[in-house]
Image (cartoon, rainbow, N blue to C red):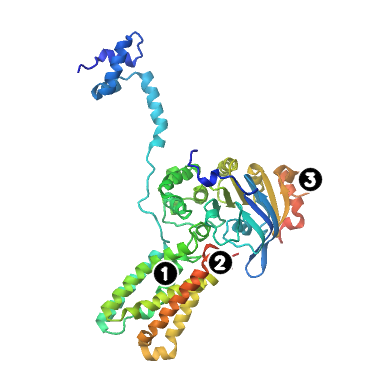
Amino acid sequence: MTHASDTLIARYVAGDDTIHADVLWGLEAHLSACAPCRARLAAVGDPAVTGVVDGVWESLAPRLAPVPRTRYSPRVVPAVAAWAISVVCLGLLAVLLHASSGGFPLLLPLSPVLPVLGVYASWARGADPAYEVVAATPRAGLELVLRRTLGVLAVLVPVLTAVGLLTGTSLGVALVPALAFTSATLALGSVVGVRRAAVALTGVWAAVCLAPPVLLDGSSYLSRPELVPLWGAAFVVGAVVTLLRRDAFGRLPFSVN
Amino acid sequence: MIRALEPDDLAPATYAWDVHATGLRVRVGRNRMAVDGLDLAFGTGVHGLLGPNGAGKTTLIRALATVLRPTGGSLELLGTSASTVDLRAVRRRIGYLPQDFGYYRRFTVREFVEYMAWLKEMPGREIPDAVQRAVERVGLTERAGDKLRTLSGGMVRRVGIAQAIVNDPRVLLLDEPTVGLDPAQRLRFREMLRALGTDTCVVVSTHLVEDVAAACDDVTLMARGRVVFQGDPAALAAAGTDEHPGDSAIERGYSALLGPAGEGSGW
């Protein structure tokens, strides 16, 4: 294949209309098939042409730039991160204390209030700064509450399971009360708002733990396996109430002003 | 601006007004009716809500945003009653900027607007472009990768506007959107309002009379949960005489219509 001469290319770029029609046709056919000749064509800098071309590129560039994608799609509320770190630390502490003193694992008496705080951190007005904009979106409501609650449980359940296994506590005792309190938070939260529900349930739990019979008997009172079915029933009741009251999660709590 | 048409955009509307309230009542707290028997009919255009603090503007906007359930009367948004349980379809077509716009400080501008687009159930493949458009529209392209905590108050407000318009809403609700914007930004914001108002039903609450005069097609003046006046800005200006307090015709009209109530409770 013979390539186009530099003179011919220069005349073509300059728009020389004395080039014969058949030569012009042959040159264009060759250029469309031959990359090296196109490169030489591009190297010929006729200011009139390059000015226009550069102008077009400049105006197109912002629109052609790929839209940067975010590294991750944020799906949880920031407050949950602090909660998750404390749960993991508490888990480690519980195992260490058990290993050193052999006593009843510290984490288990706390286990019911941990998810209450987690649900609070992930949903309540006050803990979620963007609460109001989020509440007005179509995804707000039961779906988003459950997504965030599952996020909380995804951290809590492995920690409690690990603590239970390492300290020889039955999994029912370690997990079911926590699940019951989770569903109770949501159920009560659908009536009075998650913040009040969290405060109330934490208060109830503190009262039960500090009540004289429990204090005397030590934490073993809480670890009775025969109570596990009751906790299970409480979980189911809470879940049913939450489901029935699901409309409440897409609205602001009654008390806002 | 090119965007894909959704079936919802092409379907003939079966309702006369985008926002239609009759005898609307909204209770706040145990027994205060913040909105008490209000009639409204808004279509395409920019509608200003004006009134003294405590007139019920924020409560009304919250009811329009479907986050507060109406206590009485009827409220229809895009032909759907705001009291129904499943509001997803309506909420997808609403944009909302609350008065206290809360945000996640560690998110970048783009992450936050993207998260809001996801919450508004936009299809995943449309989200990056829609976010880019919204961020460009509020003039934050250069700060799109910056964390929200590094932005100034006016910029955060613009992020709030970007998240409200990211889903190309049919009904756009803005509660005090010009708070924290400097004069130049307010001018640009009004321009944007007028542009949005050509094909969207925009409801803007404000206590700044000059915002209304500059950008709104009509004004609704509220006091104590009720409508005191409805009409275009010129009619509002015409209601005042030189004897009424105020530095501009519209301000004088505002004081004339509100009477003693407009002079506020003890201030």
Residue wearing tag 2: A253
Q: Are marks 2 and 3 on the same chain?
A: no
Disc 1 from disc 3: Cα separation? 60 Å
In which chain is the residue bearing label 2?
Answer: A
Give the number of the disc on residue B266. none
Q: Is residue B169 visible?
A: yes
The percent position of residue B73, horizontal first and vertical second, equals 68, 61
> For the residues tagged 1 and 3, is the chain the same?
no
Q: Answer above or below: position of B148 versus A175.
A: above
Classed neighbour count for the residue bearing mark 3: other residues with Cα under 10 Å, few (<14), some (14–19), many (≥20): few
Q: What residue is drawn where x is 58% and y is 49%?
A: B171
Which label's residue is closer to the chain start, 1 or 2?
A: 1
**For this rendering, which residue is in front, B20 or A164?**
B20
Residue A137 shown left or right of residue B220 in the figure = left
Which residue is denoted by mark 1 in the rendering? A118
The residue where tag 3 is placed is B242
Does dot 2 land on a helix, a strand or a loop?
loop
Q: Chain of mark 1?
A: A
Q: Classify 10 Å Cα crowding around label 2: few (below 14), some (14-19), many (20 and above).
A: many
CB within 8 Å, label 1 to label 2 = no
Q: Secondary structure at mark 1?
A: helix
Q: Nearer the viewer, mark 1 or mark 3?
A: 1
| Amino acid on which disc 1 is placed | Gly
* Distance between mark 2 and mark 3 Cα atoms: 45 Å
**Closer to the camera: disc 2 or disc 3?**
2
